[in-house]
Image (cartoon, rainbow, N blue to C red):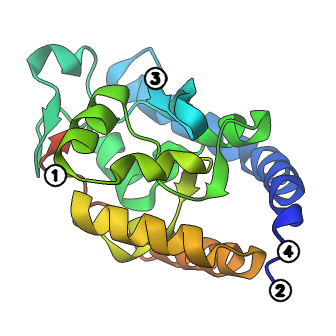
Amino acid sequence: MKLLFLKRPFDFLLSLAGILISLPLWLLIGIMIFIEDGFPIFYSQERIGKNRKIFKVLKFRSMVKDAEKQGIWTNENDPRVSKVGRFLRKTAMDELPSLLTILKGDMSFVGPKALVVEEQCLLEKKITGFEKRLEVKPRLTGLSQVLNPEDDPYRKLEYDLEYMREMSFWLDIKLILLSFYNTFMFRWDRRSGKKMQE
């Protein structure tokens, strides 16, 4: 039983609870970023979502100020990533402000990853069927993020389409629990060799 009618109420209630519970952590992270590198604390970027809707996603800034002026691609051990940023990326805590985007309804907890417009359009030209990912809301976590740590775009599409076929409330719960496990085990720091998405 897929229980997909529970997806939006679940997203709303869990994101609201997550924001309220993690607010002290937001304050601590903000102070750490400010002490190391000053303002701004947050970083926003336009992404493309369901039905090609453009929206802004908010994250804690994990790179030095004006990092995009030094190139738009990140690499392993990129010197532009701050010390605080490295910790945030390993734990995915830089994603906490994305809870606001889920609360608003532009994203879901589980689904395909929301890409920047340029990357989505580029991969659509290279990979047949890549646009199918835009038939559902993008996510904070998902099958491709949990099982595709190297972020290969072909495997990303395979996992995203598999999720769309098997999508259910219980699969969402399982993937959220796996994501919590990855956070506590510091297993999220796999962001090399791709377009900069702080």
Q: What is the distance, in whole Å, between disc 2 and disc 4 at their CAs?
A: 6 Å
Asked if one can make out residue 138 in the rendered structure from this viewpoint, the answer is no
Q: Is residue 23 above or below residue 178?
A: above
The answer to whether the residues at label 2 and label 4 have Cβ atoms under 8 Å apart is yes
Q: Which structural element holds mark 2?
A: loop
Q: Which residue is under mark 4?
A: 3
Q: Which mark is residue 16?
A: none
Q: What is the distance, in whole Å, between disc 1 and disc 2 at their CAs?
A: 38 Å
Q: Name the residue: 21% across, 21% down.
A: 67
Residue 12 in the image: x percent, y percent?
A: 84, 48
Q: Which mark is residue 1?
A: 2
Q: Which residue is under mark 3?
A: 46
Quadrant for the N terminus in the image: bottom right
Query: Which tag, 2 or 3, sits closer to the chain's start?
Result: 2
Between 91 and 157, the one lying in front of the other is 157
The answer to whether the residues at label 1 and label 2 have Cβ atoms under 8 Å apart is no
Query: Which tag, 4 or 1, sits closer to the chain's start?
Result: 4
Query: Which tag, 3 or 4, sits closer to the chain's start?
Result: 4
